[in-house]
Image (spheres, coloured by chain):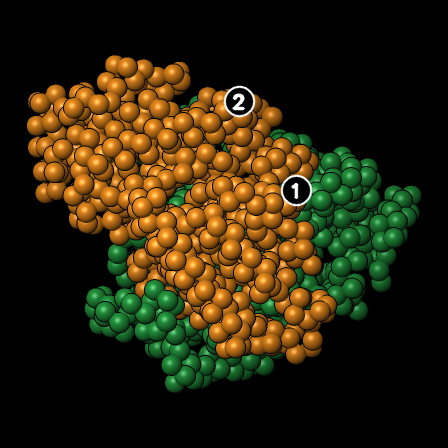
Chain colours: A green, B orange
């Protein structure tokens, strides 16, 4: 029903030649948007509504095996290139969501394909080691060349993990070990601790907590989930920990008009953080760590000022809690700096920084003192996957060689300016345009309209994602250039014009 | 210090030509143990003690980045073949531990290398999709060809995940969703549930529990860890859930001598399970699921009879708890059947069976009614990795083509008989030889002796792992043939002779 509607609108749109010339022609035409990168396509190309017949057929087939309620469509990854994702019905879409923000340099980047054809790399893919006990010869070099070369300020140690949730879970464990040893004053547990921990009881399994923020998202395994507060769908029916949840500032836009109110809002949240730390200590569940995203992503692209984060960092120091910055979605260059927390301008930003997605491997950096005191306390069979690390080395080479962080800053500026213009043009529809680099978002009137816009944009060859209750999030790859921004703005403007 | 000692023993051993002829010459000689598989080596070859100088150097280098306390040595995976792991000092070891039981068909299997050189497969490695929303075209086919072709009895649905812990965490979540909907009688949560869950509180985050067994191991993320009770090192300092822990039968060996006592022991444990289910229900923390390994692996290779499991399955039915069989270590063919629970001979063995390790991808099978009622309730960015599934298809082809399950049964019999002989020969040193297929274990006098034996065996070119307090576990690949068993027994006999 919805796709019929969109199909009709698409043909209308094509008839009126809205495809190439946006209402008002403010943006460059498709012809001008010639690709600079050989392997990229030169624009979207739609053959059916999405999902097309082949996608629907495959969804039905997979439906006998899994819940397919979240499946958008099926992809032809072989034919996808750069910023364009091709589906199984031959539709080619400009991808501004990139597999939930996890494709760093576009599809089928030649550098990554080349890596695959190097026979020296084969064995890394074929023989997955138990990294914690039997690492491959090149592991220290590769990890130095990749992850350590982009280590956040003050962090000398890094641990790889398989995914974002595992990274946060193990980071929490590092925090708990560190905190308990600090409480003890030594690292020799009592006999009672050794016995009680085996049946999940205190004092061996102490009532420590991690403070998190309303709207935050840190993963969906039970430990992570106790710090995730973005949507009911993640939380309902899951046993959890009684851990404190602080309010995250809800800033008013445009920022320059509400500077005083926003400063008050941030102060209120910080005060609440301190109150909660004291309250949970009194409850006998001391806050061992604070976890926060530099920009709450899944929760709605909620920003706070660098001052807020600097003050929060100070609160963590004052109360002896580890400060854990979750850069799983914000890390990897999309904000114009490799880590979003670099925008805070601090030498000592955190005790722990976790990553995944665009880094291709999960894991976390930590300060020396956070490293577990004994082997096997932070451990699992695979401890990551060196084949992902191989790709990461190459991704970082490309980022440096092609100055992609500068490109992101440039594209991000164009994107945000375009969003400002659009919200000025459609004030009843759009508001709160915001972003750092290409990590941008805009709010739509309501959830239903947001969802409709996403589907209409998709049928016009543009993949976007939602976040929070009524936001659209932009998560292009780092190879998303200014001319891609203009392609997007052209198409999006058309969609908006239909929804005035 | 320890390695000096072992070095001295090694040279003594070589001088005495113990290497080739075991005391008593009961087993076939190295010459007879000619390889049947082209890509395999024909025996261990040691050049240094382990870790050798190059491994030590690399360990030092990695030590600046990570805790390396668990690192055994560094590997040359390029030169490793079949059952033999080669280290960076050129030592070639018969691998009976296989990366904590996670290498299914040996190192650098030609079938897997070939897969890597097929250009059609490149894009699967280079473009990791968000499987839950944008699966690749071949995903339904590949998952049908691989995971569904080995689905446990009664299970039609399978969900891939990145690793073992994620598999169990998400399986628990499936159980909780199913259980709450059962309690509700419908799947529409109340307003109070929707609100309270956002801050981790009941009724939205209910006090449900998972019953597990002392000695069990189900992973190390906080949810999994609440069901893991094998070793202090995993548990200490970690906040946990107040979930019930039942005793796992402690069988006496040889089984045929203690059949009555063992039956009583199993009955006692089952009774305790029922008591705990009732007690936790009264506490307001009902048991939504029971998780158990068919053989407790990490906890010491503890077995129970098929009757025990059948009765436990009935208890789970009687009390409306989901039965979750964790086959992460036991699955994949090493017991001589693809799943260890097949030895119980049941049509309806469980609600959920989780896997990882030898399956190369994590995940779990579930019965139709366990599947989450809505999309995004069981979700994460990657939901597994289709490149691992590609390998699995090929691994299953090899298992079928080479009749590896039969081979495992044959090798396993030879291995267990050899262990029986050895424990008869060294009664003060070894006891409780046990196993299914090549998934075997034997107890050593005490932990210190066990650890010493492992190191001595390693220096003679044989990689073994420990488990529990004083057991050695055997976890060869499925290509571990009878003649590999004899190579092992030869060398191990030498080691034992030194430790009488």
Q: Is residue B57 visible?
A: no
* Vertical position of residue B327 compared to residue B42: above or below: below
Residue B385 image point, x, y percent: 55, 41
Q: Nearer the viewer, residue B107 or A4?
A: B107
Subunit of label 1: B
Q: Is residue B4 left or right of residue B206?
A: left
Residue labelled with disc 2? B401
* Image-quadrant location for residue A257: bottom right
* Image-quadrant location for residue A174: bottom left
* Image-quadrant location for residue A286: bottom left
Real-space Cα separation, disc 2 to disc 1, in angstroms: 29 Å
Residue B415, label in figure? none
Residue at image position (28%, 15%) is: B32
Q: Secondary structure at mark 1?
A: loop
Q: Is residue B307 left or right of residue A103?
A: left
Residue A282 image point, x, y percent: 39, 85
Residue at image position (26%, 56%) is: A374
| Disc 1 crowd, CA 10 A, few/some/many (<14, 14-19, 20+) | many
Residue B260 image point, x, y percent: 37, 53
Residue at image position (71%, 66%) is: B187
Q: Nearer the viewer, residue A361 or A133?
A: A133
Q: Is residue B178 visible?
A: yes
Q: Nearer the viewer, residue B372 or B294?
A: B294
Q: Secondary structure at mark 2?
A: helix
Residue labelled with disc 1? B135
């Amino acid at each position: 029903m919805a796709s019929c509607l969109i199909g009709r609108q698409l043909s209308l749109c094509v008839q009126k030649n809205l495809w190439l010339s946006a209402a008002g022609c403010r943006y460059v035409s498709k012809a001008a948007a010639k690709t600079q990168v050989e392997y990229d396509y030169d624009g979207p190309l739609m053959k059916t509504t999405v999902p097309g017949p082949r996608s629907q057929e495959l969804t039905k087939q997979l439906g006998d095996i899994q819940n397919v309620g979240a499946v958008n469509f099926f992809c032809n990854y072989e034919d996808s290139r750069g910023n364009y994702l091709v589906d199984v019905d031959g539709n080619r879409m400009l991808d501004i969501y990139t597999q939930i923000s996890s494709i760093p340099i576009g599809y089928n980047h030649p550098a990554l394909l080349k890596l695959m054809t190097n026979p020296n790399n084969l064995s890394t893919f074929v023989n997955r080691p138990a990294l914690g006990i039997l690492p491959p010869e090149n592991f220290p070099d590769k990890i130095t060349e990749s992850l350590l070369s982009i280590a956040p300020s003050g962090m000398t140690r890094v641990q790889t993990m398989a995914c974002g949730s595992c990274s946060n879970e193990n980071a929490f464990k590092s925090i708990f070990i560190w905190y308990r040893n600090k409480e003890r004053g030594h690292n020799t547990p009592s006999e009672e601790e050794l016995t009680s921990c085996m049946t999940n009881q205190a004092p061996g399994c102490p009532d420590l907590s991690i403070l998190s923020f309303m709207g935050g998202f840190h993963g969906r395994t039970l430990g992570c989930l106790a710090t995730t507060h973005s949507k009911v769908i993640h939380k309902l029916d899951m046993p959890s920990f009684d851990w404190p949840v602080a309010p995250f500032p809800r800033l008013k836009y445009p920022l320059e008009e509400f500077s005083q109110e926003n400063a008050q809002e941030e102060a209120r949240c910080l005060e609440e953080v301190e109150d909660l730390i004291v309250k949970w200590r009194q409850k006998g569940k001391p806050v061992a760590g604070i976890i926060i995203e530099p920009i709450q992503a899944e929760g709605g692209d909620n920003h706070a000022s660098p001052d807020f984060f600097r003050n929060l960092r100070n609160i963590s120091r004052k109360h002896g809690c580890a400060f854990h910055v979750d850069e799983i979605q914000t890390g990897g260059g999309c904000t114009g700096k490799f880590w979003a927390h670099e925008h805070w301008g601090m030498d000592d930003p955190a005790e722990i920084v976790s990553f995944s997605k665009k880094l291709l491997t999960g894991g976390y950096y930590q300060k020396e003192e956070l490293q577990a005191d004994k082997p096997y306390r932070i451990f699992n069979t695979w401890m990551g996957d060196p084949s992902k690390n191989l790709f990461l080395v190459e991704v970082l080479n490309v980022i440096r060689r092609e100055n992609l962080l500068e490109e992101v800053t440039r594209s991000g500026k164009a994107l945000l300016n375009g969003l400002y213009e659009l919200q000025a043009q459609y004030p009843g529809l759009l508001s709160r345009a915001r972003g750092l680099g290409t990590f941008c978002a805009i709010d739509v009137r309501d959830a239903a309209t947001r969802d409709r816009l996403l589907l209409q944009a998709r049928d016009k060859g543009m993949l976007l994602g939602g976040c929070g209750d009524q936001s659209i999030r932009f998560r292009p790859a780092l190879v998303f250039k200014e001319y891609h921004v203009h392609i997007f703005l052209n198409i999006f403007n058309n969609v908006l014009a239909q929804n005035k």
